[in-house]
Image (cartoon, rainbow, N blue to C red):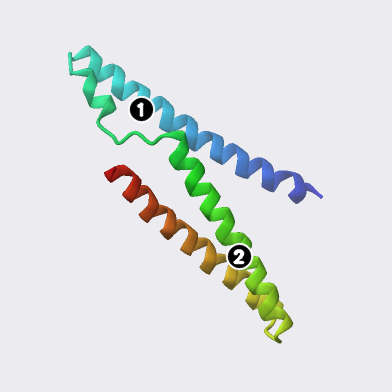
Amino acid sequence: MQADILIPLIIFSTLFGVVYVYLTTRNKERLALIERGADASLFNSGRKRGLGSIVLNLALLAIGIGVGVLVGAGLNQGGMDEDVAFPACIFIFGGLGLVVSFFVNRKLEKE
């Protein structure tokens, strides 16, 4: 009974701790750079990703997972073991969806 409570508590507290340490360390680094008089353009050196890019990635991932479930169900009906068919197809087609989203995003960035 205690494991049912402790395991999620430990997982969420660990995730919170990692995010908290990351954000506070990043804030301290930025404050130190500002105190030294560094240029503020250092903070914006990374590539900006718009909301459309994130939505496109998630949409193609979801489409890939959906196709994976359908193909897994077809393989299961064809006689393949359910414990193998579904996870394999979900991961394969989900990965293919992410690869497609990478190439689509790269094409959109060139334009």
Asked where in the image residue 75 lies, by quadrant, the reply is: bottom right
**Residue extending furthest front?**
111
Q: Secondary structure at mark 2?
A: helix
Q: Position of residue 21 (x, y in %)?
A: 44, 31
Q: In the image, what residue type sits under mark 1?
A: Arg
Q: Is residue 2 left or right of residue 107?
A: right
* Label disc, if present, on residue 67 of the rendered structure: 2
Contact between labelled residues 1 and 2, with CB atoms less than 8 Å apart: no
User: x, y percentage for residue 45?
Assistant: 24, 31
Which of the 4 image quadrants contains residue 13?
A: top right
For residue 1, above or below residue 23:
below
Q: Amino acid at mark 2?
A: Val
Location of residue 17 with respect to 56 vertically, above or below: above
Of 45 and 105, nearer the camera is 105
Pointer 1 local density, CA inside 10 Å: few below 14, some 14–19, many at least 20: few
Q: In terms of image quadrants, where is residue 28?
A: top left
108 to the left or right of 79? left
Rendered residue at 36%/55% (across/down): 103
Disc sitting over residue 26 in the figure: 1
Question: Which residue is located at x 34 percent, y 45 percent?
Answer: 108
**Quadrant the C terminus occupies:** top left
Residue at 36% across, 22% down: 27
Seen at 39% across and 52% down, the residue is 104
Label 2, label 1: how many angstroms apart (C-alpha)? 40 Å
> Closer to the observer: label 2 or label 1?
2
Looking at the picture, how far across and down is residue 101, in whole percent? 43, 53
